[in-house]
Amino acid sequence: MVQHLREKGIDDQRVLEAMTEVPRHLFLETMLDYMAYEDRALPIKCGQTISQPSTVAFQSALLDAQPEMKVLEVGTGSGYQTAVLCAMGLKVFTIERQKELYDITKPRLEQLHYRPKCFLGDGYKGLPEYGPFDRILVTCGAPYVPSDLIAQLKVGGVMIIPVGDEQQEMLRIEKKGETPDLLVQQRFGDCKFVPMRKRLDYGGK
């Protein structure tokens, strides 16, 4: 798998080492684990997916994160991307909207000895009480860039977010200052993620 990632242009050594360390098959339903190391997205519970390895590696590399940085992940899902971020030496805060996924994934990460701080909540709102964050990684397709997440990003921080409806565009947003004109945006091509649930869909507090 790692050789394939290199061929896809991933050359961040810490990302490649993390991808080697994290056992992807343990984040899948048993009946799918024979496909765990193929470069494909696979279904998980609640109609969600675990992203293909090249997407996980690509988003992780775009973060350009250094060990001990504080990272907010929006969309815990299966916990695979979460585990990769932990394996990169980052301080991970991760938020999941779906209670069924949260109840499965939080203990799974603990059993595998990854120690992110996991939360059940609204990804559009983020975790303001734990910010600001050095990096924010959104792992679902957002119809727009949530202003609450921008507010929780440190000056000098970076957000990676797929933006769009049916299909998204991968954006890298660097916050150069506290005003909108100081957000520097780069585009990294089309992509397709499950949609980020809107605020009104969330029944939690």
Image (spheres, grey):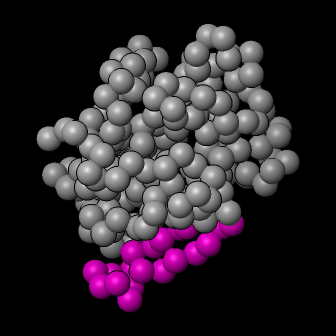
Query: Foreground: 50 or 64?
Result: 50
Residue 97's x, y, as percent? 33, 39
Q: Quadrant of the C terminus?
A: top left
Query: Foreground: 120 or 26?
Result: 120
Residue 90's x, y, as percent? 42, 43
Q: Is residue 188 magenta?
A: yes
Residue at point 27%, 43% (across, down): 202
Q: From this viewpoint, which residue is outermost toward the bottom?
A: 181
**Residue 152 position (above or below residue 28):** below
Residue at point 35%, 33% (across, down): 98
| Dominant secondary structure of the residues highlighted in magenta in the image | strand
Horizontal arrangement in the rendering, residue 154 relative to residue 141 (left or right): left
Report the number of discs: 0
Residue 17's x, y, as percent? 65, 36
Residue 114's x, y, as percent? 42, 26
Horizontal arrangement in the rendering, residue 21 relative to residue 157 (left or right): right
Res 205 visible: yes
Q: Is residue 148 magenta?
A: no
Res 78 visible: no
Specify the quadrant of the image occupied by residue 43.
top right
Q: Which residues are magenta?
A: 170-189
Residue at point 53%, 64% (across, down): 164
Residue at point 28%, 80% (across, down): 178
Horizontal arrangement in the rendering, residue 196 relative to residue 130 (left or right): right
Q: Quadrant of the N terminus?
A: top right
Q: From this viewpoint, which residue is outermost toward the top?
A: 30
